[in-house]
Amino acid sequence: MTLQFHQFAYNSDNYGVLIHEPESGETACIDAGDSAEYQAALNRTGWSLSEIWVTHHHWDHVDGLKKLKASTRASVRGPEGVDGVDDVLKDGDKFMFAGHVVEVLHTPGHTLDMINFHIPSQHTVFTGDTLFSLGCGRVFEGNPKMMWKSLQKLMVLPKDTLVYSSHEYTLSNAQFALSVDPDNADLKSRAADIEAKRKANAPTVPSMLGDELATNPFLRAADPAIRAHLGMAEATDAEVFAEIRQRKDNF
């Protein structure tokens, strides 16, 4: 049975997602940053929460975890060290949800505990704060080399994979992307589309991985045009990525 996805906004720029299998009634959610907003999403859909999947420990992803867990009696899957997790997950783990295999990808960099959830049968991945639409997470606890290796784990997924990231950052990401990849026709077209969507207050998440590979500079460290623009033709991909990340931090 095909899974249903319901994305909703909370806080100033966060996204939560409910994942529902109609036949069994099983429902999971990605993170739990605001228990009231998650409960409101459950009320709108009429779904009953079975599981909570935590990507990392930052407050805007776990502040509502204890309350949501208590009110729904949902079990919690997530990385080690997050209070309330029942099933501790690590890189390469797999688990079943409503008849679907879910693969766990450890993607440290933004935080050391960051994990992503890939559902191959649905061509869908939940990337938390690792990969954003036209961006990637700021490197807080890891280092750029670590973050680059994490992004490479996502880059090899099928191009038709739908990427659900956790923040609406795409407009500012597009503006930055054009500063390091100014001659990319695909990027220019996508940036215009993103601007129109945000003017209409429409979400830019999820995005397609194939589009990210073609336009997201954080995934394009090997691209000759970007390397030439940065004056880094002979640098390693990891070094180019680190330069792009530093520029974004100061953008």
Image (cartoon, helix red, strand yellow):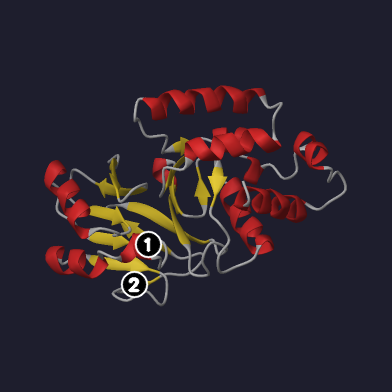
Question: At which x and y percent is residue 148?
Answer: 65, 56
Question: At which x and y percent is residue 192?
Answer: 52, 23
User: Residue beneath label 1, please?
Assistant: 95
Q: In this view, does 204 lie to the left or right of 234?
A: left
**Which residue does the image show at 60% across and 68% down from the upper left?**
142
- In the displayed structure, 198 sits above or below 112; it is above
The circle on residue 106 is none
Question: At which x and y percent is residue 104?
Answer: 46, 60
Q: Earlier in the sequence, mark 1 or mark 2?
A: 2
Q: Is residue 82 left or right of residue 149?
A: left
- Disc number lying in front (1 or 2): 2
Number of on-image labels: 2
Residue type indicated by callout 2: Asp
Residue type indicated by callout 1: Phe
In terms of image quadrants, where is residue 149? bottom right
Q: In this view, does 52 lie to the left or right of 196?
A: left
Q: Are marks 1 and 2 in contact (CB under 8 Å)?
A: yes
Question: At which x and y percent is residue 132?
Answer: 50, 46
User: Residue beneath label 2, please?
Assistant: 87
**Which residue does the image show at 67% across and 35% down from the upper left?**
179
Give the Cα separation between the discs numbered 1 and 2.
10 Å
Label 1 residue SS = strand
